[in-house]
Amino acid sequence: MWSRAHQFVSRVPSVTHLPTLNFSPSPTSVANLANLLKKGPICQCYLVPYSTIASNKSFVLNGKSLLVINHPSSYQRRGYKTDQDFGHKRRPGDPFMSFLYLSIGLALIYIPLHEYVLYYGPHFKDYCSEWFKQGKGILKSLLPKVDAATIDVEKHAKVSVGETSAEETEVDETKKKKKKAIGFRERRIIEYENRMRAYSTPDKIFRYFATVKVQSSEGTEVYMTPDDFLRAITPGWRQPDGLGLDRYKRYDPKNPSEDVHTKLELALDEDSIFYKLGSAGLITFSDYIFLLTVLSTSRRHFEIAFRMFDLNGDGDVDCEEFEKVATLIRQQTSIGSRHRDHSNTGNTFKGVNSALTTFFFGSDLTEKLTIERFLDFQQSLQREILNLEFQRKNPDEHGNITEADFTELLLAYAGYPQKKKTKTLKRVKKVFHSSPGVSREDYLKFFHFLNNINDVDTALTFYHIAGASIDQATLKHVAKTVAHVDLSDHIISVVFTIFDENLDGQLSNREFVAVMKNRLLRGLEKPKDTGFVKLLQSAVKCARETKPVLLDF
C-alpha cells in the first residue's frame, strides 16, 4: 500500500488546492472517516507519510479527490526535523527568549568589565605608560645596532647641548620619584596580608612578618625588627619577596663578621625605645604582644588599672603588681584575648621580658613604677613608631613629606574603600599640588592632638549641639584649649580638605572623630572576626534566655 500511494502521488498530472483531512488515531477521527466512506466512492483514501508529500495540499487523481491522511513516520516520532526546515530554512525564534538570552549575555559582559574598571581605573594611566615602555623596549631590541660613526655624532651632539642634557637628567630624577604602579600579583598579595592583619591570630601574624631567626646555644628564636613590627600593624605595606610565613633571614651572633646593625639594617637612634627591650633592638614574640597591648590601650585605661592595684594609694606599683596590671589589660584587648600559646612553634607569651623589667624596676627589681613614667614610655613608643612611619615616606631635602603622603598615613586605618580613598587623594593633590609639604614637627603635633581625641570629641559635640559650625578656626581653638597643641594653619587646611567632601568649609564631625580614633589605636581594637561567630553566639544566648511561646500558658 505504501508503494502504491507513492506511485500515485508521483504520477499526479495536476494539483488542485483542496483541504487535507489530518487524521490522528482517536475514536472521533475514526468515526468521522467511517461516515465519510459510507456515502460512496467519492474519494480514494491512501495512508502516506509526511515525507512523501511536497506540500500540505490534496491531489486529484482521475477526476476524483484523493484524500490524504497525514500519518507521522517513525523518523518523525523521534523528533527529527522534516518539512518545517525544508531547504534548511531557519525556524522563527521566540522574541521573548531572544531578549532573555541577550540580557543574560550583556550582564555577563558588563559585570566583569565594570569591576575591572573600578579596580584598575585609577591606575589605568600608569598601566598604559608601563605597557608603552615595554613595547618601546621590544622595538629597541628588534632594531639593528648603530654603527660607530653614528655613535660619534651622538656624542658630539651631547657635548654641544650640555644644558639640555642636564635638564633631561633632572626630568629623569623627577620621574624616578614617582611611585611604581602596583601590578595584579602585588595587589592580590597586599589584599591577602591585609586580611591576615585583620583576622589572623597574633601567633600567625608574628610568624609571617618576622624576618630574623637567631641561632644560639639554646636553640633558635624568631625576632622582629622595628620595621617588621611596623609592617605587621600597617595595612598596605607588603612583606619583602622571599620572606613570609616561617621564612626568615638567619643571623649568627657568634660570627664576628656579622654585625647586627649592618646585617639586619637597623636604622635606629642610640636612645631608641626598642633598645630598652633588649636583644639589640630586636623584638621577641612576648615583646610583640606587650607592645600591641601598650599601643591599643588608651592612657585613661592605664590610669584606672594602676589605681586598681595601688593598694596603699601612693600612685606607684612594684614589679609583681605591674605583672597583674599588664595581664589584666592584655586580657581586655582583642589581641591578648585571642592569643593562644603554641608550643610547637615556640610562640608562647612569657610575660614582660627581663630587660624591660630592669628598665622599669632596676637591676634588683626593688624600685617602684609610677603611672607618669609608664605613660611617658607609652608616648615614647608612639613617637618612635610615628618617626619610622614619617621616615618611610622618604622626606625631601627640607625634611617634608607631601600632603598626599600625610593623607595616606592619616587614612591607613580608616577602612575606606579603594575608590573613596583614591578620590580623597586626588582631591588633596589637586588642592596642594604646589605646596611645600608637611614637616616632621607638624606631623608629630597633629598626632599628639589625637592622643586627646576623646576630649576633642566631647568639645566638638558641644559645638554641634549648640548649632555652631565646625570650621577651621573652631578646630584650631579646640586643639589649643583641649589638647594644648598649637596646630598650624596648613595642617588644619589639609585635614579639612580630606574630610570636607563638598568643599563647603565645614568639617564632618562624626566621620572625622571615628577615623581619628581608629588611627590612634591603629585599628588594633577592631573585632577580629567577620561577625558570623557573634551572630551564632547571640542566637544561642537568645535561645537560652527566652522561654518558648508554646510553654507560655
Image: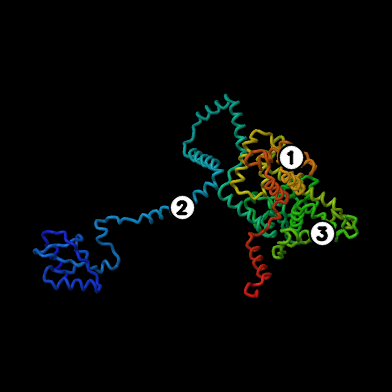
Q: Name which of mark 3 and mark 1 comes first in the sequence.
A: 3
Where is the C terminus found, in terms of image quarters? Answer: bottom right
User: Which amino acid, mark 3?
Assistant: Val
Q: Residue 261: x, y in percent?
A: 74, 48
Q: Which residue is mark 3?
A: 325
Q: Which residue is mark 1?
A: 474
Foreground of the two, 22 or 211:
22
- Does residue 330 appear to the left or right of 126 in the view shown? right
User: Which amino acid, mark 1?
Assistant: Thr
Q: Residue 204: x, y in percent?
A: 67, 59
Foreground of the two, 462 or 122:
462
- Does residue 343 appear to the left or right of 159 in the view shown? right
Front label number (3 vs 1): 1
Within 10 Å of the Cα at label 3, are there few (<14), some (14-19), or many (20+) other Cα atoms? some
Q: Examine the rendered structure and indicate whether residue 192 appears above or below residue 342.
A: above
Q: Secondary structure at mark 1?
A: helix
Within 10 Å of the Cα at label 1, are there few (<14), some (14-19), or many (20+) other Cα atoms? some
Q: Secondary structure at mark 3?
A: helix
| Alpha carbons under labels 3 and 1: distance apart | 39 Å
The answer to whether residue 189 of the structure is visible from this angle is yes
| Alpha carbons under labels 2 and 3: distance apart | 59 Å
The answer to whether residue 387 of the structure is visible from this angle is no
Q: Residue 44: x, y in percent?
A: 13, 68
| Alpha carbons under labels 2 and 1: distance apart | 50 Å
Q: Which residue is mark 2?
A: 107
Residue 358 sits in which quadrant? bottom right
User: Which amino acid, mark 2?
Assistant: Ala
Where is the N terminus found, in terms of image quarters? Answer: bottom left
Front label number (2 vs 1): 1
Q: Name which of mark 2 and mark 1 comes first in the sequence.
A: 2
Q: Secondary structure at mark 2?
A: helix
